[in-house]
Amino acid sequence: MQKYAAASQVIVRLQDQDGELRFEVTDDGRGFDPGTVRKGSGLTNMQDRLDALGGSVALTSEPGRGTTLRGTLPGAASLPTRNRLTAAVGVLDPVHA
């Protein structure tokens, strides 16, 4: 966040609600217009991994107003056994999942 956003503060929220893990990461950085910036591999990789686990991710930002990344994941009990471990360590091999 410091590298691109020039943020001085980042807030991370995690919540277990209705069998889902919900997360939100918000910064007070410079923000950007998502409609004019090409999506990089970092966000694409996050989306791919969350999709593979049945989750979702969304990004909102505005120049001068920071950026927020929100997402959801199904609760660990609803994941296939192999994906519980890979989700916990943040690694997913979609070829062998």
Image: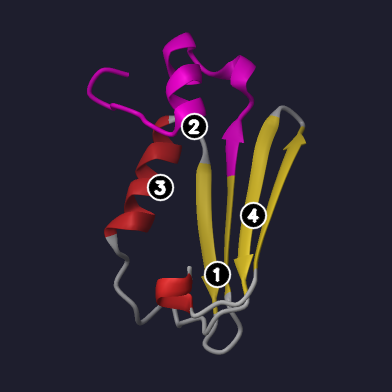
Q: Is residue 34 visible?
A: no
Amino acid type at mark 1: Thr
Query: Element type at marker 3?
Result: helix
Residue 35: which quarter of the image? bottom left
At a point 29% along the width and 64% down the height, the residue shown is: 40
Which residue is disc 2 drawn over?
54
- Return the disc, 3 or 2, that comes first in the chain's sequence: 3
Question: What is the crowding at mark 2: few (fewer than 14 residues within 10 Å), some, or many (at least 20)?
Answer: few
Q: CA distance from mark 2 to mark 1?
A: 21 Å
Which residue is disc 3 drawn over?
47
Would residue 80 be found to the left or right of residue 25 on screen? left
Which residue is disc 1 drawn over?
60
Q: Answer yes or no: do the residues labelled 4 and 3 have beta carbons within 8 Å?
A: no
Q: CA distance from mark 3 to mark 2?
A: 10 Å
Q: CA distance from mark 4 to mark 3?
A: 14 Å
- Return the disc, 2 or 4, that comes first in the chain's sequence: 4
Tell me if residue 10 comes above or below residue 46 in the rendering: below
Mark 4 vs mark 1: in front? 4
* Residue 18: % across, % down: 77, 31
- Return the disc, 4 or 1, that comes first in the chain's sequence: 4
* Residue 46: % across, % down: 40, 47
- Return the disc, 2 or 1, that comes first in the chain's sequence: 2
Q: CA distance from mark 2 to mark 4?
A: 17 Å
Q: Answer yes or no: do the residues labelled 2 and 4 have beta carbons within 8 Å?
A: no
Please state the extent of the stretch shown in magenta in the rendering.
72-97
Q: Nearer the viewer, residue 57 or 23?
A: 23
Which residue is disc 4 drawn over?
24
